[in-house]
Image: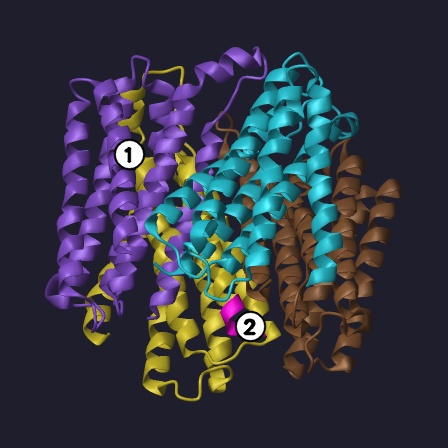
Chain colours: A yellow, B brown, C cyan, D purple
Amino acid sequence: MPKGRVESFADGIFAFAATLLILNLVVDQTRPLAPQLLDNWTSYAAYAVSFLTIGIIGANHHTVMHQIGRVDRFFLLVTTLFLMFIAFIPFPTRLLALDIRGPDAEAAALVYGITLTGTALMFNILWRYAASGRRLLRQDADQRVVDGISRSYLLGPIAYGIATLVALKSPLASAAMYVAIAVFYIAESSVFGRSQS
Amino acid sequence: MPKGRVESFADGIFAFAATLLILNLVVDQTRPLAPQLLDNWTSYAAYAVSFLTIGIIGANHHTVMHQIGRVDRFFLLVTTLFLMFIAFIPFPTRLLALDIRGPDAEAAALVYGITLTGTALMFNILWRYAASGRRLLRQDADQRVVDGISRSYLLGPIAYGIATLVALKSPLASAAMYVAIAVFYIAESSVFGRSQS
Amino acid sequence: MPKGRVESFADGIFAFAATLLILNLVVDQTRPLAPQLLDNWTSYAAYAVSFLTIGIIGANHHTVMHQIGRVDRFFLLVTTLFLMFIAFIPFPTRLLALDIRGPDAEAAALVYGITLTGTALMFNILWRYAASGRRLLRQDADQRVVDGISRSYLLGPIAYGIATLVALKSPLASAAMYVAIAVFYIAESSVFGRSQS
Amino acid sequence: MPKGRVESFADGIFAFAATLLILNLVVDQTRPLAPQLLDNWTSYAAYAVSFLTIGIIGANHHTVMHQIGRVDRFFLLVTTLFLMFIAFIPFPTRLLALDIRGPDAEAAALVYGITLTGTALMFNILWRYAASGRRLLRQDADQRVVDGISRSYLLGPIAYGIATLVALKSPLASAAMYVAIAVFYIAESSVFGRSQS
């Protein structure tokens, strides 16, 4: 089972799921365009946050695959489940964009949060299965790097899980947390990542 | 005719057909969101089953290509027909998701079954053409592995064919069988595949 | 300018354009499903013909790229124009599927024919630019193979051009010719291609 | 962080964003087809201009990656932002196609211009970050080629920025400038590029 084809399948899903996000942006041709374009800012924000989130997860998936020397069928199954969550992201993104300012805000924020929490959980399972007892790691994978990844990935499901629960109290606060998590990961990866590469 | 480009074309179709499944999930913006989201469970189930089915077929296609040393134009033609069925899957998936609880359940379950039976048949033809007399196999392909693949792939069209016929009696039972086939393949590949890799 | 990235960009367009064809298949949820599914046969036929046509062109593009040793910016430009026609195919495919039995049959058959004629023309320009004076060919490209490709590709724009003109007299005859051209290419490539590979 | 996976993610976005443009072409099945097809010429023009623009940017991205020897996390982040603009292009393309002849022409031309200016800006940041002090360049990258790229890429944001401002006075002149910029890049790349390759 060559590792390269897992990567190319995953890259395909990352790229397509990110590009499909644009189909969520729609305007009503029977109404004036300019006010709609201004009013659509939640759609642009949701597009940007989900695109960047998929991009960050994709970059982290590269990091993971870089530590991995071989894959087995179970790893492949978990990867498929993980990618199933990635490909799902365009749906709650549209809900969040359209409903965050209306009466359906809570439901939209919940679905978005559950999807991202599930994505982060699958990513942790994928990594921990590979790293536990160095099951699928490369011979020369540095154990400190491996432990660092394990620690830092734990944050994802916790942060998204909290943001999902917050949606029950305040959908807007929940949405703000989704933005903040993406910004945090961007800042962390580009600041720390830069120095260590 | 390099084998690598067949794989990259196939990977594109697998990834793209799986990602397009998300476009089947729609909600009516004029009605409350929460009850729709709960009522949509058949759509999530259909999304998951079809995504996993495409993922499993993709993984099996990797296994097949791993045994193959060269490709010819006829193999390419059968691969294209096979991928034509793969790319078709989003259409019956939407029908099954939307109609399994209504008066159109039989038609929807039939179309889903015919598509998956056709997919499994094309995959068998593709493999048997390559393996018969070791026509396109690698020099060092293990004959026991080859025979094992031939035996195990025979199950696909039979199982999907039976599930399709069941749709004439009970669409719900048919749909349950589509789920069961996917679960069986997942269990088989991850349990047996893990020990042998 | 590495030849490999031209191939991966082209493979992406081939795979996506073929997969997007499925979005042309739609049913009206407010009417019974079974009669619609039977009535939709022109949509399945159009899906199959366009999918196979894109597959054949993709396989031929592989053959061309196999003869080519290097690419330049002009070749890249013609390739982009060629791929622009490929990515356009889903649009006339939908028109042909929906309108071939109605009053708009002539317009639909014309647009389909013009698109395919344009695609075949661009493919010829692409190949002739590369092959003329062996401009971009590999050192070891066999001149007889090169001349064979040049002869056989000339058929494409002529056949599609005639079928397009036929649409002015009989859209149905024109549509039958589009099917026949695809079948001819499939037969030719799998029968002759098999023996020579 | 292997450069190859950045390229494959980028190639996926380029190919997919270009192919999704075709979904902007729609006809109303309740009205006669032929007059709509003729009236749709702005849609074909917009499709062609955006497809070619994405193709040119893709080719230029190849040129850039060819000079680059390694990538870091910050470069990856800027690439993701750059690809976020690329994947956004289908949306303003649809607006421009549908509204350039109506009362919403100014808004449509503005959004198209802002998107392309942003794309060109991100591309410049991406390149300048890599090239400044030869931070990420290959050891053997020719400094004259590097300086040539730096000079020629400066044109993009300036040209698109001016065309965007022109939209405030004349949306039609602005749209003509978008066409002219694409034609200029095509002419430049195929004429000059041919001799130097």
| Circles 1, 2 touching at the beta carbon (< 8 Å) | no
Percent position of residue A61, x then y: 41, 66
Mark 2 lies on residue: A75
Residue drawn where x is 74% and y is 79% of the image: B145
Horizontally, residue A21 falls left or right of residue C88, namely left
Check if residue D19 falls in the magenta segment: no
Q: Which residue is mark 1?
A: D183
Q: Can marks 1 and 2 be said to lie on one chain?
A: no
Within-10-Å neighbours for mark 2: few <14, some 14–19, many 20+ = many
The type of residue carrying mark 2 is Phe
Look at the picture and state if D168 lies above or below D188.
Answer: above
Observer able to see residue A179: no
Which one is nearer the viewer's eye here, C177 or D45? C177
Q: In which chain is the residue bearing label 1?
A: D
Tally of numbered tags: 2
Q: Is residue C140 above or below residue B86?
A: below
Q: Position of residue D3 (x, y in %)?
A: 33, 67
Q: CA distance from mark 1 to mark 2?
A: 48 Å
Q: Can see residue C171?
A: yes
